[in-house]
C-alpha cells in the first residue's frame, strides 16, 4: 500500500493538517505525518504540541502516493530537502497538494506554471505562473491540488479522498462527517 505523507513544521495550521489526516484515515488511506523540525514533536500555530509519525530523513519517497503541505506558516518554504523531494515527485507526475499559504512553495518551485490554483488571501503574488482561482475552495489541475484555507479543509481533504479512493469512498466519509 502506497503512503500519503503530510509535512509538519513549527507553526503549521492545526485544522489543515489534523483534519486532513483524520479524513484521509477515515477513508482507510495510509497517512503518515512527517516532521521537518529536529524533533518528532511539532508545535502548531495555536500552540498544540503534535507528535509526527516520522522524521523527514525516515521517509522513503518511493513509497509515496501523495505529498501534502498544510499552511499556517511560510516555514515550509525554508526546508530545502523537502522542496527538492517535492519538486522531483511532482515532476514525475505524482500528486502534490498544498493549502492556505503553502501553495507559495509550489509557485516558488515552478510547479504552478500554466496551472490553475488557489491560496489564502494575500499569498496570490507567490503563485508564480498560476492562473488564480481564488474564488474556489479547492482547485485541481493535473497532479496539483491547492486549497484556499482553514475553513475549507474538509472540502480539500474530501477532494483528496475522491482522487485516491473514488467518489463512493468520498461520499461515505462525507456522510459520516455529516457533510454534503
Image (cartoon, rainbow, N blue to C red):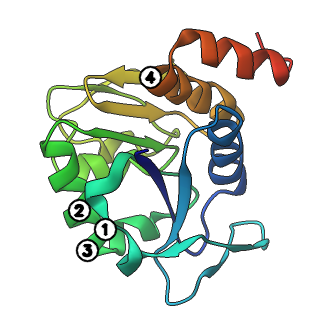
- The answer to whether residue 116 is left or right of residue 139 is left
Instruction: Tell me the quarter of the picture where residue 85 sits.
Output: bottom left
* Disc 3 residue crowd, few under 14, some 14–19, many 20+, Cα 10 Å: few
- Give the CA distance from mark 3 to mark 1: 5 Å
Residue 17's tag is none
Q: What residue would you read off at disc 1? A: 82
Q: Which mark sits nearer the N-terminus, 2 or 3? A: 3
Q: Are marks 2 and 1 in contact (CB under 8 Å)?
A: yes
- Residue 1 seen in render: yes
Q: What residue would you read off at disc 4? A: 163
Q: Which mark sits nearer the N-terminus, 4 or 3? A: 3
Q: What residue would you read off at disc 3? A: 80
Q: Are marks 3 and 1 in contact (CB under 8 Å)?
A: yes
Q: What residue would you read off at disc 2? A: 85
Residue at x 35%, y 66% (from the top left corner):
77
Helix, strand or loop status at disc 3 = helix
- Give the CA distance from mark 2 to mark 1: 5 Å
Q: Residue 111: where, in percent of width, then height?
A: 19, 42
Amino acid at each position: 500500500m502506497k503512503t500519503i505523507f503530510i509535512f509538519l513544521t513549527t507553526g503549521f495550521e492545526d485544522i489543515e493538517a489534523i483534519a486532513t489526516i483524520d479524513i484521509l484515515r477515515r477513508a482507510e488511506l495510509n497517512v503518515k505525518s512527517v516532521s521537518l523540525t529536529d524533533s518528532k514533536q511539532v508545535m502548531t500555530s495555536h500552540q498544540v504540541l503534535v507528535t509526527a509519525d516520522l522524521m523527514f530523513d525516515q521517509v522513503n519517497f518511493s513509497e509515496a502516493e501523495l505529498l501534502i503541505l498544510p499552511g499556517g506558516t511560510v516555514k515550509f518554504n525554508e526546508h530545502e530537502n523537502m522542496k527538492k523531494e517535492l519538486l522531483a515527485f511532482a515532476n514525475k507526475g505524482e500528486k502534490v497538494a498544498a493549502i492556505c499559504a503553502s501553495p507559495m512553495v509550489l509557485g516558488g518551485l515552478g510547479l504552478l506554471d500554466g496551472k490553475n490554483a488557489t491560496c489564502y488571501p494575500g499569498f496570490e503574488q507567490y503563485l508564480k505562473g498560476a492562473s488564480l482561482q481564488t474564488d474556489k475552495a479547492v482547485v485541481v489541475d493535473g497532479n496539483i491540488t491547492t486549497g484556499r484555507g482553514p475553513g475549507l479543509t474538509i472540502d480539500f481533504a474530501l477532494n483528496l479522498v475522491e482522487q485516491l479512493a473514488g467518489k463512493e469512498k468520498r461520499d461515505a466519509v462525507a456522510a459520516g462527517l455529516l457533510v454534503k
